[in-house]
Amino acid sequence: MRILLVDDEKEFVATLAERLELRGIDADWVTTGEAALAKAAERAYDLAILDVKMPGISGLKLEKLMAQRHPGMKFIFLTGHGSASDYHSGIAEDRVVDYLVKPVNIEALITKMQATLTS
Amino acid sequence: MALWAKFKPDFWERPEGQDWPFKHMFDFRRIWKRAVLLIAGVALVPLVIITAVDYNVTQKAIVSDVLLQTSRLVSNTKLSISFFLTGRAAALQFIVEDNGIAALKDPRRLAEILGHLKTAFGGFVDLGVVDSGGDQRYYAGPYALTGVNYRDQGWFQEVVGRGVYVSDVFLGFRNVPHIIIAIKHHLPDGTFFILRATLDTARFNELISNVAVRGQGDKFIINLNGQLQTPSSSHGQVFEKVGFPVPPYVDKTQVVEGLDAGGEPAIIGYSYIPESPFILMIVKRKATVMRDWLQTRSRLIGFLVISITGILVVILGVTTYLVNNLHLADQRRVMSLHQVEYANKLASIGRLSAGVAHEINNPLAIINEKAGLIKDLFSFKPDYAQDKRLLELIDGVIASVERCAVITRRLLGFARHMAVSVEPIAVRALIEDVLGFLRKEAEYRSIDVVVEVPDEVPTFVSDRGKLQQILLNLINNAFAALSDGGQLKVAARLAGSDALAIDVIDNGSGIAPEDLDRIFEPFFSTRTSSGGTGLGLSITYGLVQELGGTLRVQSQAGEGSTFTITLPLQMPQPKGDASANPAGGR
């Protein structure tokens, strides 16, 4: 599986990508929405993990753009805002989307990725 | 004081909101006092003035009526006496003119005239003719008085001087009280003679005793020396001197206020009877004649006292009722301002905690990933994979990050639930969530916290944010009441088919019985010295009501308290809920 990580926190996204790589997952990372669009134009990704709040193009907007350009691509959102539960659904751009709350447990993330890809 | 306790407004003993900047804006005691004084003044002053005026007018009217009556009685009696005397003097004058001295010298004729006088007038005792030398030359009557010389007697001098004379009542030679009427008649030869008649005093006394004086008054005649001439009921016997000075001469009837012989206040009417030495007197005891006035006065004062009491009762009742309501409305106003302030404060805390949590979450995520990477690197390299010590250290870092994450998520959750969010709620999770904020304090203070939620308690639909605030306030209160090592129990149970109850039970200091009725009132606090605003429980009470529930308390001083929240399983629809989301969106 090939995934793209998008988060304005470079330290976070680079480390997460490296950890996924260690687990045999092909993970690229970028820190802006614009870079993500460019990267997605270069390579085909199965899944994008997007930070909700980013300067420039927000995660929700980016998801919409990428979904238009790359049909079949799956998305998982990461957010710094969360409730007591680690995972919950919310409304974004009239669609139900799934969130994972930072800091994330790597195993939970991989499980979620697999579930999303097979859905 | 018992009466005051009835009228005392509810707010009298209560302190105004001590922590409120506008606490001096309204002084309800002053408002109450001013209202009572003003209304009482407006109502009572005219009443008192009118009553005082009426009192004076009525008193004057009654006094003047008594004076007038007395004056009339004295005048009428004076006329009767005067007529009695002048009638008899005129009769003597007629006898002299009609008969002439020659006829009067005849004893038989004189006796005959005396007989006629007795028949016609009554009261005549004898009749005598006295010559200018004072000798009684001719006499008709029961005594042997022919030849008696009167030259040296006062009456003789008087009649010689004045022509007509009416004597005082005196005893004279015969030693029986009598009056003399004498007239002087001039003869053509320049000499004169005097026709002298004696009257017994029975008719005279009868005249006086027949006078009807209202109110046990006394009526009598005195002479110019103040000696009684007729019997008196309370001023002594005939010839005794009355106990007050002889009134000064006036030619008209006089009525004055003075003291009677007994020294009591009296209305004294008197009149000098013309051509006589007599003064007619009527003395009425003031206390007796003014009895009517005293009755009227008692009624007037009674009416005034009853009216004033009635008016004061109404004024106190109405003022207390109105100012109580005013005070209540003001308390509500201040309370709602406080609630706004409190909500704003909570919203600020919510925003602040959300901001802090978010800011901390990002570095936490980095620490988490870095530590995760270190662990991954160690795990994936055989050299380090066996180093348990290293892996434990890394797990320790990751576990601490997870603990921090739980805290930031709870803060974020708290902020997020500030908004109105009616949702299904699991009671145990809710209680644990709130207790999470206080868990550390409980540990430090060795407070044993027990949560009891039986399985049959279902999830219920309500406002999570408000419930969190309610439980947080109650549990905070319980913590304040508990001493270190105490016990707090939060227990949920079903209360009927459509409600559940949550009991917050502590074994702390409890609430004094006199405070128990007032603890949900705004600004009532037993912890003012330690910063209590007295609003926590009243706001909690309001929040429970907003959720369609009730909040009750049971407490024993020294043994602990139980606060019971009863909530419907399905929260009623709030009316026009316009709550904003104070914590902001995602």
Image (cartoon, rainbow, N blue to C red):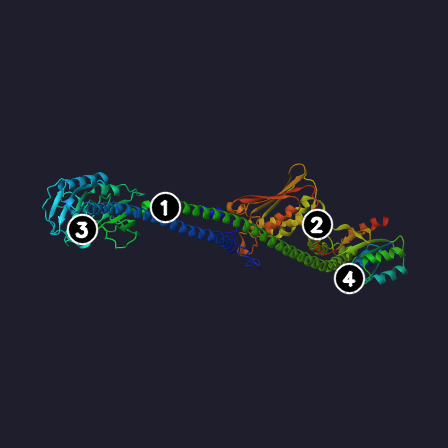
Q: Position of residue B398 (x, y in %)?
A: 72, 55
Q: Residues within 10 Å of mark 3 (few under 14, many from 20)?
A: many
Tell which subunit mark 2 falls on: B
Q: Nearer the viewer, residue A61 or B358?
A: A61
Tell which subunit mark 4 falls on: A
The amino acid on which the numbered mark 4 sits, given as a three-letter code, is Glu
**How far apart are the alpha carbons under marks 1 and 3?**
58 Å
Q: Position of residue B231 (x, y in %)?
A: 22, 43
Please name which of the two marks, 1 or 4, marks the residue nearer to the observer: 1
Q: Which mark is residue A9?
A: 4
Q: Are marks 2 and 3 on the same chain?
A: yes
**Residue at 66% over, 46% down:** B547
| Residue ID for mark 2 | B577
Tell which subunit mark 3 falls on: B
| Residue ID for mark 3 | B185
In terms of image quadrants, where is residue B103?
A: top left
Tell which subunit mark 1 falls on: B
Q: Which mark is residue B294?
A: 1
The amino acid on which the numbered mark 2 sits, given as a three-letter code, is Asp
Kindly check if marks 1 and 2 are in contact, taking CB atoms under 8 A apart as contact: no
Asked if residue B446 shows in the view, the reply is no
Point out the image quarter for the C terminus of chain B. bottom right
Task: Identify the element where label 3 is drawn.
Answer: strand
Please name which of the two marks, 4 or 3, marks the residue nearer to the observer: 3
Kindly check if marks 4 and 2 are in contact, taking CB atoms under 8 A apart as contact: no
**Residue at 67% over, 41% down:** B568
